[in-house]
Image (cartoon, rainbow, N blue to C red):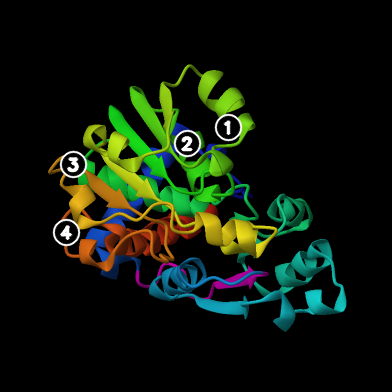
Amino acid sequence: MRHLMSPLDLSVEELDNLLTLANDIESNPNHYAHACDGKKLATCFYEPSTRTRLSFESAMLNLGGSVLGFSSADSSSAAKGESVSDTIRVISCYADICAIRHPKEGAALVASLKSSIPVINAGDGGHQHPTQTLTDLLTIRSLKGRLNQLTIGLCGDLKFGRTAHSLIHALIRYPNVKFVLISPDELRIPSYIREDVLKKHNIPFTELERLEDAIPDLDILYMTRVQKERFFNEEDYVRMKDFYILTKDKLKLASEDMLILHPLPRVNEISVEVDDDPRAVYFKQAQYGVYVRMALILTLLNWR
């Protein structure tokens, strides 16, 4: 039995196989329509989610399985003080696989240690968001044709943004990948990512404050929102929330084949006028999230 806590739980070969399976699911959905008949997915979401929770549920339903779970801590026994360890032991009696999101770093790992079914980390605080990373990798590989030889700009909240942290962890394993880290000083990438991941593995990166200075050289622009729920006070959030807004004018500086990704939800960091630009692929990215989660469920359930 395997769990998925981090993108690094999969070797590069396993990751490539997973993405290939996701592409085959996209091309041949009917072939997989009954692959999980009789199987149940539990979605245990201790904090709000739209895309991640619904894409997991959509993935399982597309595979012929069924879904149970809760969408907030208030609607579970966590509101009565039940621990994650006890909850997952109970869930293991009801379901075949579980996706868990929790505001505390390490909560999914705690669940995996006590679970008798595969556990998928669907986001733990500001730490990891591995299935979003799998979605990002599938989007890039499907639309760019490669995961190597890329210059990737990560823009916005790089301090609390678990999607950015997970993507860096995953992509450093591919050759000739460079990062441009675009953020205000207050939201710079954490030192442990800078020192223990990028510098330790000799990954080239630059840190900039102005999006306009970075955009001409990028193959991928990965926008993130400033996350209100990660701030300790309203004043800091209000000061930072409009620091970056991608507009049509700024896109004039970009190459014709640059891709714009965003894990969503968007607030106002990408102007709606950008949505019609062929380089804007964030809604297509959400669709890829269903395919990759279908592939992950099949992989962890040892489907053949």
For residue 243, side relative to residue 40 (left or right): left
Label 4: few (<14), some (14–19) or many (≥20) C-alpha neighbours in 10 Å: few
Q: Identify the amino acid type marked 3.
A: Leu
Mark 3 secondary-structure assignment? loop
Label 3: few (<14), some (14–19) or many (≥20) C-alpha neighbours in 10 Å: some
- Residue where numbered disc 2 is placed: 168
Q: Residue 272 occupies which quadrant of the picture?
A: bottom left
Q: Identify the amino acid type marked 2.
A: Ile
For residue 89, side relative to residue 50 (left or right): right
Q: Which numbered mark, 4 or 3, is in the foreground of this view?
A: 3
Distance, label 3 to label 1, CA atoms, is 29 Å
Label 2: few (<14), some (14–19) or many (≥20) C-alpha neighbours in 10 Å: many
Tell whether position 1 is magenta.
no
Mark 4 secondary-structure assignment? loop
Q: Which numbered mark, 2 or 1, is in the foreground of this view?
A: 1
**Residue 198, how many percent across, how many down?**
51, 25
Q: Which numbered mark, 4 or 2, is in the foreground of this view?
A: 4
**Residue sitting at x 35%, y 56%:** 245
Which mark sits nearer the N-terminus, 1 or 4? 1
Which mark sits nearer the N-terminus, 4 or 3? 3
For residue 5, side relative to residue 144 (left or right): right
Distance, label 4 to label 2, CA atoms, is 26 Å
Distance, label 2 to label 1, CA atoms, is 8 Å
- Tag on residue 193? 1
- Residue where numbered disc 3 is placed: 253
Mark 1 secondary-structure assignment? helix
Mark 2 secondary-structure assignment? helix
Q: Residue 227 occupies which quadrant of the picture?
A: bottom right
Q: Which residues are magenta?
A: 33-46
Q: In this orientation, does residue 224 appear?
A: yes
Q: Identify the amino acid type marked 1.
A: Ile
